[in-house]
Each structure stands twice: as C-alpha cells, then as structure tokens.
Amino acid sequence: MEYVLIFISAIFVNNIVLAQFLGICPFLGVSKKISTGIGMTGAVTFVMVIATIVTYLLQKYVLDVFNVGYLQTISFILVIASLVQLVEIILKKVSPPLYQALGVFLPLITTNCAILGVAIMTIQKDLNLLQAVAFSTATAIGFGLALIIFAGIREQLELIDLPKGMKGTPIALLVAGILALAFMGFAGLV
Amino acid sequence: MNQWKNFSKGFFKENAVFTLLLGMCPTLGVTSSAINGLGMGLATTFVLIMSNIVVSLVKDLIPDKVRIPAFIVIIASFVTVVELSMQAYLPALFESLGLFIPLIVVNCVVLGRAEAFASKNGFLSSMIDGAGMGLGFAMALTILGGVREFLGSGKIFGITIYPEQYGMLVFVLAPGAFIALGYLIAIINKLKKA
C-alpha cells in the first residue's frame, strides 16, 4: 500500500514537471513531437533510477560516514555527469538499437534538474533504498506522462492560427498552465 | 567590446528568461512572490559572477575534453558557498527557496555563460558579463514574482495593494507560473516587433 501511495503521489499529485517545476527545459525543448517525447522519457527513466540508487548509496556509505554532508551538491552532480557518460558508453556497446533511440537525449540529461532534484529529494525524504527506487521510477513516469500529453497537444497547436506574439513559447506555456490546472484536480488524492 | 553594451545586453536583448528561455525551472518554481524571485536572482548572480571569473582565469589550464565537468565542479563549489551562507544568515529565505538552491548547479544560464562567454574572454569582460546576465535574470524573476504576487494575493513585496480576498489564488499556485510567464513573454515579443 505504501508503495502504491508513493506511485500515485509522484505521478499525479506532486507531478515533477507540473507541480514541482523540475525538468522544465526538456519539457519545453523536446515536446514538439510525441516520438521524441517518448525517447526522452525512456532516457530520463533510465538515468533517473540509476542515478538515484548510486547517489543514495554515496550519501549513506560515504558522505554520512565521513560526516561531510556539505559536499552533497558537488559530489551528486559529478556522479550524475559521469554516470550519464558511462551509460552512454555502455549502451553504445551493449545495445546499439537502444542507443540509437536514446542516444541524442543522453548528453542533455546532465543538466536536467529533475535528476539532481530527485536525488536530493530522496535524501531529504529519508526513504529507504526500495522506496527510493519506487519514488524515482514513479517520478520518471510522471515526467513522461506530462511530456507526452504536452507533446500531443503541441502537435495540434501547430495548426492553429494565433496572434504573432503568442506563437511558439508563450502559447506552449499557457497550455502547460492549463495542464497544470488539470493536474491540480488530483490534489488531495493522497 | 564596449563594456557597457556587454553589461546591458543581459537585461533586454539577451535576457536569459525572456528571450533565451534558459533557467526555466527556478524561474517558474520560486517566483510565488517578488522577494523570493529577487533572492533567487541575486543568489544566481553571485554564482554567475564568481564562476565566470574563475573560469576565465583557469580556462587555459583546463584540457578541452574535460572542460564541462571542470566548469560544473567550479559552479558547484560556489553553489555550496551560497547554500551554506544563506542557511546561516537568511534561514527564512533558505526555507522558502528550498530545493532550488542546490539546483543552481544545473541552471543552464550559469553553465551556458561559462561555456559560451567566460571560456573565450578575459577576466574583466567575463565578470561584467556575469553581472549583467545575473542581474537581468534577477530582474526577470522579480518582475514575474511581482506580477504573480500582485494578481494572486494583492501584494507587492508584502505590501498590500488591494484586499487579498479579491486575488486570483491560482497565480500563486503552480499553474499561474506558466500562465503569467506565457503572457509576459508574449508581451515582450510584441514590444520587440514594434
């Protein structure tokens, strides 16, 4: 039951993009087409879960043990940056088709604040390892859900006649606002 | 390059938020009030100036291949400085900005300036560029925070303009951030064309 709650909370109620404002850059940047949205979601899910596990172990077995909590920001971002590189290299070797699908998105992920955000939130919420895995998976699914819905709407937006000033980013932001309003309907569910 | 131009470009022509669309996460996340926007903007400005200075000084020592990780380490050190000093001296602001303080590390504006400007220019230009870009970012966040606070709760910087019960609560909540920023960018696009 506890894990069900973690999932519902992270996907709908505290959606990472629409309620917590993390990962807005890829949300606005790669949401012009549903297919790229799906690719990005795959890459984010992959990296987010691995990064959360690694940073969790780092916090518990290195930073806490040596009492150097103030190195959290530096060490986490370094771990994430090198992890992304590592994932890229391994994926290229082990599974070329998967690399083909996710490859272009991987370098973008280092500066995706959702990854670092989830890693830090996991520590702040004091979850155990299994809960951390559930939390990061659910958050990634929530990211994907928001991104794919948004990409679907944006594909239709291309066809609409708009005032010049509203074209592009402004209308995308308005749509995101309305989407966030819709997601607010989930508040109180958990 | 003319130093004044170098400084002032961050405010309008190359404003990080309104025209380059960088650093959207803190822009939307912390601007529920003008004071939060200003605090976040100034914290980012500090990191931006310091990291630009250091990057411009050490740029010749860093091998090209590892420059991005090296920049990230420099930025992360200054973010840690901001994080710890804010926790010590401004605990209330630290509390309300929360997670977004460590996330300055992944703010694309900071890394973007290190890569696009400081790694190619000298010490003084980089410092001025950092200050201009940072203050432009702070300005954008303060404006957005002010608009949201005014529409949402009838206040600006905590000073009541009209009674709170007439405010549109939605502007203080998450959706209002997207909607307010969308209209602000639309207005600026319109002004630019005129």
Image: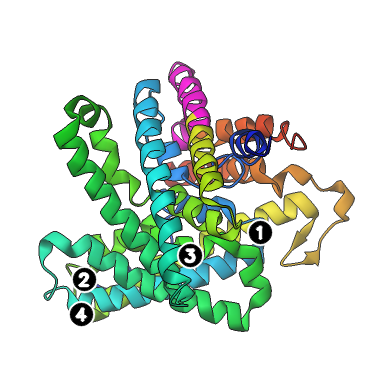
- Measured in 3D between alpha carbons, the distance from the residue under mark 1 to the one under mark 3, in whole angstroms, is 24 Å
Q: Quadrant of residue B32?
A: bottom right
> Viewer-nearest of labels 3 and 4?
3
Q: Which residue is mark 2?
A: B1
* Comes first in the chain, label 2 or label 4: 2
Q: Amino acid at mark 1?
A: Gly
Height in image: A71 above or below A150? Answer: below
* Comes first in the chain, label 1 or label 2: 2
Do pointers 2 and 3 mark residues of a single chain?
yes
Split into 4 quadrants, where in the image is the N terminus of chain B? Answer: bottom left
Q: Amino acid at mark 2?
A: Met
Q: Is residue A150 magenta?
A: yes
Q: Amino acid at mark 3?
A: Pro
Q: Which residue is mark 1?
A: B146
Q: Quadrant of residue A59?
A: bottom left
The residue at the point 59 percent across, 34 percent down is A11
Q: Which residue is mark 3?
A: B102
Q: Is residue A16 magenta?
A: no
Height in image: A69 above or below B161? Answer: below
> Viewer-nearest of labels 2 and 3?
3
Pointer 2 chain: B
Do pointers 1 and 4 mark residues of a single chain?
yes
- Measured in 3D between alpha carbons, the distance from the residue under mark 2 to the one under mark 3, in whole angstroms, is 33 Å
Q: Which residue is mark 4?
A: B57
| Disc 3 secondary structure class | helix
Q: What span is in magenta?
A: A145-170
| Disc 2 secondary structure class | loop
Pointer 4 chain: B
